[in-house]
Image: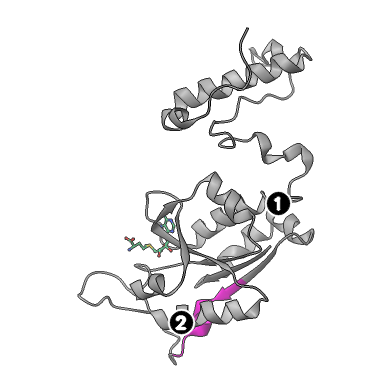
């Protein structure tokens, strides 16, 4: 997958893309990141990319020209069209199923806003998937873009090793993940449930499913209402 990021602050991405799973994915040749500075596409001699809002009001709005030119220029840099994602608090909520859908694309282009956001004509000018990472306002689309990249890239086949398989993670079946334990078997009086060390695969499976359901019911009743029924039947 090729990922293009259009931003006024490309340096913000270096640390996140250069570490851990996101770096390994690039090293394995499964993804390539391309950072573009929207400011490089302005025709203004002072490199201005924002202006005051018509009608008055606080703050500055990103002007259409550099963003249009950046999107069109970057698109031409690759051999195939990109699925364009506009980071905006007014977009649809980013979920695991959005991440799964985006992980099947060959090319993504993430467009990050700043200041008071985008001139409306930017939104109108392209076929964007408009994505919000939650109901709060951040100062720019850079952190949301990093969230999207991280969630998407780890789903690309081959990025995670078998032992890190995303198959059993929270949200996969509409449920939160069951509780996990590792060594030691007892820590400060807190014990690992016997069933997990029983070696009885079916019982472990059933316990995990029950725990996932119970935990989702308690912590996320909104998810629980929509979750499918149990797969294993209690005896
Ligand atoms: C300060 S925000 C602009 C908010 C805008 N004035 C509004 O009320 O909808 C600046 C930029 O940060 C990004 N942003 C802020 N919060 C976001 C969120 N929850 N999800 C995705 N992007 C967000 C967007 O790219 C946005 O254009």
Residue in the picture at 76% in, 12% down: 198
Q: Is residue 196 visible?
A: no
Label 2 residue SS: helix
Is residue 40 found left or right of 116 in the rendered image? right
Q: Position of residue 171 (x, y in %)?
A: 55, 37
User: Do the numbered discs 1 and 2 sit on residues whose CB atoms are within 8 Å?
Assistant: no
- The residue under label 2 is 66
Q: Point out residue 53 in the picture as x, y percentages from the top left corner.
A: 27, 75
- Front-most of 54 and 46? 54
Q: Residue at x 49, y 83 (%)?
A: 69
Q: Position of residue 224 (x, y in %)?
A: 47, 28
**What number is the disc on residue 7?**
none
Name the residue rendered at 34%, 72% in the picture: 120
The N terminus - image quarter: bottom right
Q: Nearer the viewer, residue 190 or 3?
A: 3
Q: CA distance from mark 1 to mark 2?
A: 32 Å
Name the outermost residue toward the left.
55
Q: Residue furthest bottom?
A: 45
Q: Residue at x 58, y 34 (%)?
A: 173
- Read off the magenta span: 35-43
Position of 29 compared to 231: left or right?
A: right
Question: Residue 178 location, x and y as percent?
Answer: 60, 25
Please tell me in which quarter of the rendered image ligand 1 is found: bottom left
Q: Which residue in the protein does label 1 denote?
A: 21
Placement of 81 over or under 175, stated as above or below: below
Instruction: Decide if residue 110 is on the left or right side of residue 165.
Output: left
Bin the neighbour count of mark 1 within 10 Å (Cα to Cα): few under 14, some 14-19, many 20 and up: some
Quarter of the rendering containing residue 230: top right
Mark 2 burial class by Cα count in 10 Å: few <14, some 14-19, many 20+ = many
Per the image, label 1 sits on a secondary structure element best described as helix
Q: Is residue 105 visible?
A: yes
């Amino acid at each position: 997958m090729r990922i293009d990021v259009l931003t006024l602050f490309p340096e913000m991405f270096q640390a996140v893309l250069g570490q851990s799973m996101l770096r390994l994915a690039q090293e394995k040749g499964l993804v390539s990141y391309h950072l573009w500075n929207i400011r490089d596409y302005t025709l203004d001699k002072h490199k201005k990319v924002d202006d005051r809002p018509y009608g008055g009001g606080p703050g500055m709005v990103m002007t259409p020209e550099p963003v249009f030119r950046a999107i069109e220029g970057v698109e031409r840099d690759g051999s195939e069209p990109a699925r364009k994602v506009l980071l905006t608090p007014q977009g649809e909520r980013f979920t695991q199923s959005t991440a799964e859908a985006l992980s099947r694309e060959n090319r993504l282009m993430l467009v990050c806003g700043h200041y008071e956001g985008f001139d409306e004509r930017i939104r109108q000018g392209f076929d964007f998937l408009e994505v919000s990472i939650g109901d709060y306002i951040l100062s720019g689309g850079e952190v949301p873009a990093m969230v999207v990249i991280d969630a998407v890239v780890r789903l690309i086949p081959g990025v995670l090793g078998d032992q890190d398989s995303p198959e059993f993670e929270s949200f996969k079946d509409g449920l939160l993940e069951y509780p996990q334990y590792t060594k030691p078997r007892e820590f400060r009086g807190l014990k690992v449930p016997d069933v997990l060390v029983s070696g009885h695969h079916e019982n472990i499976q059933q316990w995990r499913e029950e725990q996932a359901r119970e935990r989702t019911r308690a912590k996320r009743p909104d998810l629980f209402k929509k979750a499918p029924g149990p797969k294993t039947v209690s005896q």
